[in-house]
Every structure is written in C-alpha cells, then in structure tokens.
Amino acid sequence: MKIDRAEALRYLGYRGQKIDKQTEELLEETIGELERDSLPKSICREYDCRVAGDDILLGSLAVTSKNLARNLRGCRRVVLLAATIGRGADFMIKRYSVVNMAKAAVAQAAGAACIESYVNEVEDSIRESAQKRGLYLRPRFSPGYGDFPLEYQRDIFDLLECSKRIGLTLTEGNLMMPSKSVTAVIGLTPQANESCHQKNCSLCEKTDCEFRA
C-alpha cells in the first residue's frame, strides 16, 4: 500500500500550490511512519439489491435514501465493504498533538490519504472480479453522505461482522474506531456505460453526475 502524496496534500488544503520544505519533510516522514505501522484489513460481501423509489433492499438490510437509490438504480447486486488501516494513525495523531501540532495535522491528512489509497486497492480487486462476470462498479457510497444516514453504520457492521473480522468498533455516535476506516456500498451494474471511473462520490467534483448526492 502506497499513500498518494497529492491526496495527502489535498486533505491539508493544498490545491496545486508549492509546499514549503518543512511541510514536505514532515509529510515524507509521516507517510514513512504510516506505511510502516499501518495494519490494513478489509471485509466485503455481496448481496442482492432491489430499488423501488427511494426504498432499497440490500440483502436483508432495508434503507430509505433518495441519493443512494439514485446511485444504485439498475443494480441487482451490491457489495458492502468495510476497511481500516488500524490504530497506527490514531496513535500518531494523539502523540503528536501533545508535542508537535504541525506534525499532528500532517498525520491527520496522511492518515485520511492512507485509508483512501487502501480502499481504492480493495475496490480494484472487487472491480476485477466483477468484470469477469460482466458487471461494472458504481462509485462507492458511504453512510453519512447525502441523505444516507450515519445510523446505517451499525447495520453494516452487523452484516459484515466488522468487530469480529477486522477489529472495527463503533462509538455511541456511530463513528468508527480506529478512525481511519471506511464503510461503503458499491453497486454492481451490467451496463458498462452506467458505471463510473470515479471511486468515491464524496471526493468527486462532477456536480451534475446522476449517481451522486
């Protein structure tokens, strides 16, 4: 797993401008630590998918969401995914928040880029398997995005057995621990022209896309 430097800089707020040498050194040092200390794990399972209006059935999980229904329109199968890079990033952020706030901020951004890179790798594997069956991926859609309530985290956790399988837990507010973790729904469509090469709706700048929130 290689962390995307450009993605880490984007999380730091950089949009193409040149970074100073100190920030560059902090970024490289932090990325090195994360790539060394991260323990990426994931689990994904495939379910039947039915969409009727704004009501969706993902296996046994019933969801009501206009945005997710639009994303999954025409999909008969769906993949539920959970992934984490472990506690390394959380430990770094906590440690550096006490002694070096600049490095803590860089660790926060690099950790976000790290889980994004890892989930992209997992999704590439899902895509390869799906294409062998003549199926194509819609962009992944996570609880908390658009009108897909964060409360559905708990249902996804139960279906995927996240605590048992990959050590993921939820707070009372449905936030994941370790914090650099992702859950997502990925629709599988038989129509190649209805797939999307952008992997994550929340990071896409194409505001007129029919599949996004």
Image (tube, rainbow, N blue to C red):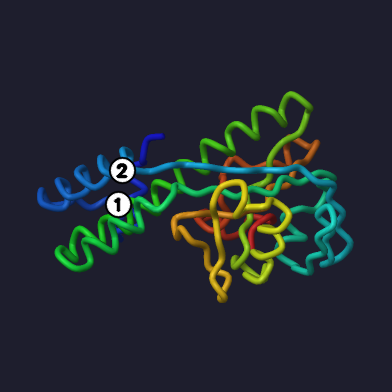
Secondary structure at numbered mark 2: helix
Q: Residue 174 carries which label?
A: none
**Are the residues tagged 2 and 1 within 8 Å (C-beta)?**
yes
Q: In this view, does 171 lie above or below 20?
A: below
Q: Residue 92 or 67: which is nearer the viewer?
A: 92
Secondary structure at numbered mark 1: helix
Q: In this view, does 34 lie above or below 212?
A: above
For the residues labelled 2 and 1, the Cα–Cα distance comes to 6 Å
**46 displayed left or right of 100:** right
| Residue occupying the far top of the picture | 132
**Category of crowding for the residue at label 1, using alpha-carbon neighbours closer than 10 angstroms: few (below 14), some (14–19), many (at least 20):** many
Residue 31, located in which quarter of the rendered image?
top left
Residue receiving disc 2 = 5
Residue 138 coordinates in the image, percent (x, y): 68, 45
Residue 127 coordinates in the image, percent (x, y): 65, 33
Q: Where the C terminus falls, by quadrant? A: bottom right
Residue type marked 2: Arg
> Which residue sits at x=66%, y=58%?
157
> Which residue sits at x=23%, y=67%?
97
Residue receiving disc 1 = 9
> Which residue sits at x=46%, y=58%?
178
